[in-house]
Amino acid sequence: MWQPSDSITIPLGDWVQVFVRGWLVPNFRDFFRTIQWPVDQTLAGLDGVLNAMPMLAFAVILSAIAWGTAGRGLAVFTFIALTALDMIGVWSQTMTTLAMILTAVVFCALVGVPLGIAAARSDRFAAVLRPILDIMQTIPPFVYLVPIVMLFGVGMTPGIIATIIFALPPIVRLTNLGLRSVPENLVEAAYAFGATRSQVLWDVQIPLALRTIMAGLNQTLMLALSMAVIAALIGAGGLGLTVYTGLGRLDVGTATEGGIGIVLLAIILDRITQALGEEGRVRRSPSLLETLKGFIRPGGTRTGDDDLRRPAR
Amino acid sequence: MSEKLVAERLVKVFGDDPDRAVRLLEDGKSKADILTATGMTVGVSGVDFSVREGEIFVVMGLSGSGKSTLIRMINRLIEPSSGNIIIDGDSITDADEDALRTFRRDKLAMVFQHFALFPHRSVRENVEFGLKTRGVEPGKRRVRALEMLDQVGLGAWAEAAPSALSGGMQQRVGLARALAVDPEILLMDEPFSALDPLIRADMQGELVALQDKLKKTIVFITHDLNEALILGDRIAIMEEGHFVQVGTAEQIVSEPASDYVAAFTQDIDRGRVFTAGSVMVPPEALDLATDTSQTALERMERLGRDALYVQQDGRIAGAVRYRDLAAAARGNGADLRAQIITDYPTTAPDTHLYRMFRLCASGLPVAVLDRDGRLAGVVEPESVFNQLAARADAGAATADTRLQA
Ligand SMILES: Nc1ncnc2c1ncn2[C@@H]1O[C@H](COP(=O)(O)OP(=O)(O)OP(=O)(O)O)[C@@H](O)[C@H]1O
Ligand SMILES: [Mg+2]
């Protein structure tokens, strides 16, 4: 039976190939290499500091941060988890992954928050941005790994760039949402007292949207962590590489070591950033037991989901 | 007193082609016509008014009559579709963004129906807000804010969160925030409507007391005529986007311009609207130098009064009653001077009738004294009660006309 492809075929693959290889790469390679520079520098700095720091010193510092933000329970958990990672033998990989993730998140915030602000201010810009974010969230990362390799080569930085693309949408969306759900009468009151647009933004809108923005940051962080293994495919190191190596050799043990590292890191960072988002509300200090229960109980101490629905106070 | 704030032909149309609606309005089309013809809502359909310096100008009307739209056009939170607003001779409607901000910072402050306090700031920081936008340094801001909070009786709450305060207290903060910038014009959009009746009465009293001290120019929105009558030096009644009557409380109540206005006035407390001055009659006083018991009795009979005041050299000497004089005449004691009662009730022309009930209880007419202590008129007790009772008649009358309609 006849079908359309018997008569006409669309060589989409060829077109893209020509577009990327024949035009984008030769013309813009230098440009992309320039963009890469700040990412390189940030990563090198973070990686250097984290890997140079004695394991115990780092564990104490991160536990202290956990205590300060989320309470005693998470602090104890953090210390135990980091010690376990050290004893498993994946300490330096953990630090590398952490440096990568933090770099990606810093750039997501630097790019995403201003984009979210712009989207909140202009309906037209928001309308243009939305489908782009939809595409970024639905397109499988494997699709853009190839052009990224062509433009940036292989290594840590291309891995981080792929991570940024993957993890950017939530912070943009939630910054936009948070700013838009600031009660109109408060914004109006600020203007009535002669505030400028930037005074309204910094004194009223951002503080009131902060909880929602932090929820976005939390989601961005989690997405960035989930890219760790995929980024390893194009030469990023760390725990992702451990998993990937284990996979390649069908070495279940190694893969598990890397996997546990990612999971523990995810839990710690998730709880800390969530608690940051709740800053300013009455904060109690949950015990270790409560914290652990929170990990397994759906909707336990986790409040990220309803942050999305409830407008910021 | 000079004109502080003037509005000329102010129009606001909500919709995609306001200019077209403005032309239709100029052709005399009504709000409803324009809505059916174009789908656009007319919020305010051509309002003129002027507010004098130091005056409380109250705009009163039912929900949806365009009061909020009107007051928000004064500081351009809502952009007028056409017309002009002039403050101290300068047009705010023509101002560019910078000039508008200067107007808002230096001349205007607003108090909102639902308070609109910033929940992430302390009470003090809320009060400081207007000063902060002006770039006043933190130390000075703080001093001023605390001073304002003391003025509204909330000095002890400076560091509390607004959400810890009751509604009445929150609105005091709203008022302190507005007063902190020492505005020339205070815009108040139903500031007390969200409060309980008792608290509302408190706040009204407090606003009156503050205004006696501060003498701001105030535009005050309300849907409560009693509130309008208590606060307003002049009152504008708004219906369907335009003013149907502008006048003093007494004018509005005694000569309502339409059934719409009359319908509002029937339930009001007339004792708080009318003053001694509005019901007093000429004193027709006797003069001790020329009058005798005989002429006094004749004059009372002619005027149909039970008592008259007696003056000597232009000052009140006291009052005499018909029945005392008549009794004395029968007993031959015809001296006018001997019958004078020196314990008589007095009041000022601007005393509200509800404060005069006790004065009327003496049975003597109340002497109304002007600022120099001279007898300006007298208030007969029954005229107070007649004025208060007019409510029932007016109410019944409007109810009748509405039934017939
Ligand atoms: N943003 C808007 N878009 C469209 N129509 C509006 C808008 N704001 C007000 N209106 C309409 O304009 C008219 C006047 O509204 P306004 O809010 O000024 O009334 P109000 O007298 O303040 O009433 P209330 O006592 O309920 O506050 C109403 O018909 C309202 O529906
Ligand atoms: Mg209103």
Image: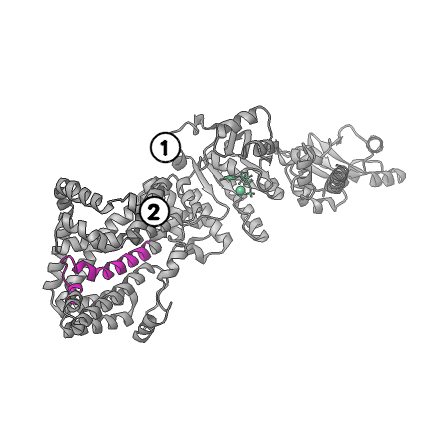
> Would residue A278 appear left or right of B321 to someone viewing this image?
left
Residue at far top of view: B27
Quadrant hosting residue A307: bottom left
Above or below, A229 against A124 in this view is below
Q: Residue A106: where, in percent of width, then height?
A: 22, 53
Q: Amino acid at mark 2?
A: Arg
- Closer to the camera, B335 or B115? B115
Q: Amino acid at mark 1?
A: Glu
Q: Is residue A241 magenta?
A: yes
Colour treatment of the image: one colour
Residue range highlighted in magenta: A213-242
Mark 1 and mark 2 on one chain? no
Q: Are marks 1 and 2 in contact (CB under 8 Å)?
A: no
> Would residue A87 appear left or right of B306 to someone viewing this image?
left
Tell me what residue is drawn at x 51 percent, y 27 percent.
B20
- Most common secondary structure along the magenta stretch: helix
Tell me what residue is drawn at x 36 percent, y 43 percent.
A127
Residue at image mark 2: A130
Label 1: chain letter: B
Above or below, B265 against A66 in this view is above
Helix, strand or loop status at disc 1: helix
Quadrant hosting residue B33: top right
- The numbered disc on residue B59 is none
Q: Is residue B178 magenta?
A: no
Q: Quick check: can you spot residue A200?
A: no
Residue at image mark 1: B97
Quick one: label 2, few (<14), some, or many (20+) residues within 10 Å? some
Q: Residue B287: where, in percent of width, then height?
A: 75, 30
Quick one: label 1, few (<14), some, or many (20+) residues within 10 Å? few
